[in-house]
Image: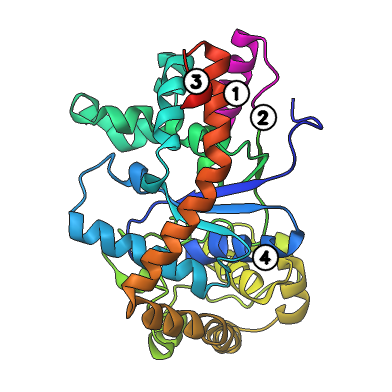
Amino acid sequence: MTGPSHSPRVFSGIQPSGNLQLGNYLGALKRFADAQSSGTPTLYCMVDLHAITVWQDPADLRRATRELCAGFIASGLDPEKSILFNQSQVPEHAQLAWVFNCVARMGWMGRMTQWKDKAGKNAENASLGLFAYPALMAADILVYHATHVPVGEDQKQHLELARDIAAKFNHDYGADFFPLPEPVIEGAATRVMSLRDGTKKMSKSDPSDMSRINLTDDADAIAKKIRKAKTDPEPLPATLEGLDGRPEARNLVNIYAGLAGLAPADVMTQMGGKSFAEFKPALAELAVDRLAPISAEMARLMQDPAEIDRVLARGAERAREIAAPILRQTYDIIGMVGAQEV
């Protein structure tokens, strides 16, 4: 149903949970910045409503939201080219989410892998928001009639649910209204793994700071973490197939490829046969070259929180110019009296 009536539009969001790291940069921020040159309208959101599905310290949430915005800008996103905003300043997200709560089925939500993982054995004590947040994610996307959504593999199931919600709404009301958004999962390092364990995703929650490269790390810290990253004793192979069963080696190759803008196979062509004593310094130099300027720019931006707030407020105004008419049309389709005056 993503036909001529739905012009291409890109939307994606990140939770402001603090401590941006290399996985966020390669898996999201860098991809977002690269997409600006495509000519397709782009909206990127700090999804603070999603963040409160678990309790957040208010001061930490404000700081993390501003830090995420600083990370977006420092990574190359231009607020004049892309719409940057935080979710809570655009009430249409929550309003459409209620409609989608009434479209989605309990069984759909209960099958979400992340719900099972996050709630675990304590599902009775989890918030209703944590259970229902995939419907809010669908609203985040569809309130802009977004057609393409850059996501990581771990969010693909939620995007499939957004498509199901859009399709059911369209079917229930006999309207070809919402597009069926397509996931955009691409790049060499859309899933960056821990520097201490190549089988685990790089995460801010890992107790070891050496497991990750934070976007706030300085050049010395970045180089040190690369030098001490876990590897195996074998040299790099000449082909990607030679990385099978070598998760730490594959992770470092993928990181190099992501930072250099190369395909992993091209990295193997350049680096195959080298020992890690040779490869790690090259990776460290590349990582410092790419990431240290981002760290410095984030620090500069965070010195002026009022300017970040102005960027977010202006972004929210621009986002509402798109979202408000779509919500009004949604209300009209489902029979809300006075919907066109909302």
- Whether 178 is among the magenta residues is yes
Mark closest to the chain's N terminus, 4 or 3: 4
Amino acid type assigned to the residue bearing label 2 in the image = Leu
Tell me the residue that label 1 is attached to.
166
- The answer to whether the residue labelled 4 contacts the one labelled 2, judged by CB atoms less than 8 Å apart, is no
Residues 207 and 103: in front is 103
Q: Mark 2 points at which residue?
A: 180
What residue do we see at 55% from left, 22% from top? 330
Assess disc 4: are there few (<14), some (14-19) or many (≥20) residues with their C-alpha within 10 Å of its C-alpha.
few
x, y percentage for residue 223? 45, 87
- What range of the chain is rendered magenta? 159-179
- 57 lies left or right of 150: left
Mark 4 or 2, nearer chain start: 4
Left or right of 266, for residue 188? left
- Gap in Å between the C-alphas at discs 3 and 1? 20 Å
- Dot 3 falls on a residue whose secondary structure is helix
Mark 3 and mark 2 lie on one chain; the one further toward the N terminus is 2
User: Which residue is rendered at x = 51% and y = 32% of the image?
Assistant: 138
